[in-house]
Image (cartoon, coloured by chain):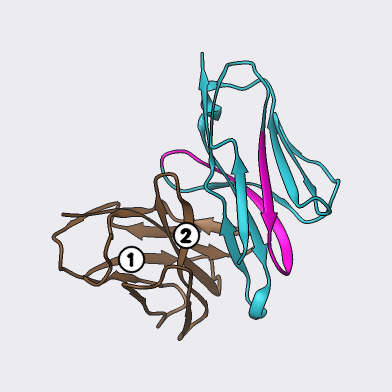
Chain colours: A brown, B cyan
Amino acid sequence: DGGITQSPKYLFRKEGQNVTLSCEQNLNHDAMYWYRQDPGQGLRLIYYSQIVNDFQKGDIAEGYSVSREKKESFPLTVTSAQKNPTAFYLCASRGGGLHFGNGTRLTVT
Amino acid sequence: EDKVVQSPLSLVVHEGDTVTLNCSYEVTNFRSLLWYKQEKKAPTFLFMLTSSGIEKKSGRLSSILDKKELFSILNITATQTGDSAVYLCAVENTGAGSYQLTFGKGTKLSVIP
């Protein structure tokens, strides 16, 4: 089935560690996005990529990094510089609207 | 800065009631307005609206856009407990040659039996 796969579903890390969230799509979409969702905050854009080997910062990019080496893959690294990393992270791709993965819930203690 | 405001932020109704959710926006280079339903995980797409005054309908859900007054409403008739979710409104712009979505904070709907 075509879709977006995020892994893992739940992730626990100690403060000070970098962590990478996976996002893979087989929809052949060029554009991919990472959002962060906190309770009562809606979705906020972290990074997006319109095409392979190119990406732009969203509204809250500080403390995050991404890469787009393949069309299918858009991993997000949450670095130790991110002050409040505990959140629900959603990856999406665009093709006739935005298609979302099932999210990764990251908890940093 | 683009802005999307949803109201109310939360709502509790009884099964069978009709509800109206509101979304107002300020955005440059408007392209479309989208509604999503989010239960436990990924938001699921409901409607995309691009033209004023044309109602989109899917079962008990309907939505309409007013581009002059810059708002949209989402109606749910004969609500059921399965309608309990967070409903997200997002506005898409075409600034700088790329498409970006700005989301509202969502309306949390709780339908009680």
Q: Which residue is mark 2?
A: A44
Q: Quadrant of residue A83?
A: bottom left
Q: Is residue B42 left or right of residue B20?
A: left
**Which amino acid is tagged 1?**
Ser
Query: Could you say which disc has been placed on residue A22 in the image?
Result: 1
Q: Is residue A39 left or right of residue B51?
A: left
- The answer for which chain carries disc 2 is A
Q: Is residue B59 left or right of residue B90?
A: right
Q: Position of residue B101 (x, y in %)?
A: 59, 62
What is the secondary structure assignment of the residue under circle 1?
strand
Q: Residues within 10 Å of mark 2 (few under 14, many from 20)?
A: many
Q: Nearer the viewer, residue A17 or A2?
A: A17
Q: Nearer the viewer, residue A79 or B38?
A: A79
* Stretch in magenta: B21-40
Q: Residue at x 65, y 57 (%)?
A: B91
Q: Quadrant of residue B100?
A: bottom right
**Which amino acid is tagged 2?**
Arg
Marks 2 & 1, CB-CB < 8 Å contact = no
